[in-house]
Image (tube, rainbow, N blue to C red):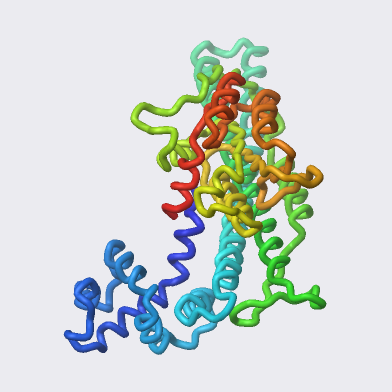
Amino acid sequence: MAESRDDRRDMLLGPAYTAAHRALARLDDDEVPAALRLVRATSKKKALPKPLRAVLAGHLEEEWLRTLAAAELGDGESASDRASWLYLARPEGWEEALDDIVEDTTERSIRHELDSVRAELDRLRRVNDDLGRRLADAEARNREFEAGNGSDDRLAGLKRRLDQEVRTGQQQQRVIGDRDEEVARLRRELVEADERIAWLRSRNLPSGEPGERATGGGRTFGRGNPVETARFLDELVEAMRPRQHAVEERPAHRPLALPTGIRPDSAEAIDWVRTIERKVLVLVDGHNVAHDFTSEPGRTDRDRIVSEVARLRRLSDGPVSAVVFFDTGHAAESHQNFGVSVRYVADADDAIVAAAANSEAECIVISTDKDVRRRAAVEGALSLWGTALSDWIKRK
């Protein structure tokens, strides 16, 4: 599975941590807090161990240390330098600008990985074509020997070679199939990244300036059309697909059930959802979960829940689809955000149960409402508490 967005953000902030480490080294012993003395004593020539890096990151929430670290930060123009400056200086809108840099870096990383997979697919296709020619030659030689009543020994040797060619070809077909799945996964991640970038850009667009957006450093990053990107990648996958595939019957899956020891109200339940490798539909009672963060959820709180459900999809091993329901007193509506379907309905409880009943995929319902969980279970869905998702979000 690809590295998480949090990991990429932490990597981008490397110059900030290095600058803070240098700043601590310049202080006198009595000026360094006790919790940071072990960080200060670590050699600056080596990267900080992960536990000490976490301690330093926690203290960088204190303005005095950020100020000292910002003074040590260089004037580089790399993505890491820009991200670190935003993190330490924290001008107005820094969080959105930092999100833009992380998303831009993520998109470029995905595109680079996609190019590598495409090159490997080209190589495998050439190898597969060569194997096909060799197999055809072997079959022709086999027919020639049989027609000419060749010796049993020579015929047996030829058949062994033919069997070996067939096994090699089948193995190559499996490798190409695995690469097809990898391209499909990259396509999903790239489309989701484009959707999130488009949403971030629209959120930060100043009125009257449709071609620009505000960032902490005043920089503008271009984006492709996500629909065209998806269409191109669909065509690429179809072009790379082997001409013949053996149809394999897959065994029926057992109904979804939490592993022993994992409570349905814990963040560990969401971690387990991420490991499911088959097709799953996750139905979320949005306002229900949002109430774990604030008594009166607003638009920002709703956007946060949708964004975190999208993060759950990106981090999942299998093809997870997700729908987030919100109650509304206005006209019903639905739209897509970050690859997640968002629906505003008159009664979210009834809509969730109806979606679980009509779904062809296995369902996981996330709601604190006991009656919703009971009704969903009758329809065959696995029910988790809303606190499982909210605790998983808070743990980030």
Q: Residue at x 36, y 27 (%)?
A: 260
Q: Say which of 351 and 239 sits in front.
A: 351
Q: Is residue 386 above or below residue 51?
A: above
Side of 32 where 340 appears, left or right: right
Please state the horizontal and vertical placement of residue 98, each as a whole percent of the image.
55, 71
Q: Quadrant of the C terminus?
A: bottom left
Q: Residue at x 35, y 81 (%)?
A: 65
Query: For this rendering, which residue is in front, 215 or 325?
Result: 325
Q: Residue at x 74, y 76 (%)?
A: 206
In front: 394, or 244? 394
Q: Nearer the viewer, residue 59 or 158?
A: 59
Task: Report whether residue 59 is seen.
Answer: yes
Above or below, 310 against 382 in this view is below
Residue 192 placement (x, y as % from top left) = 65, 52
Total marks shown come to: 0
Residue 20, given in percent of the width and then of the height, sits at 34, 80
Instruction: Name the outermost residue toward the left.
Output: 29
Residue shown at the point (35%, 68%) measured from the top left? 58
273 in relation to 165, above or below: below
- The image position of residue 268, as x and y in percent, is 40, 40
Where 17 sits versus 114, above or below? below
- Residue 162 seen by the camera: no
Q: Is residue 235 left or right of residue 323?
A: right
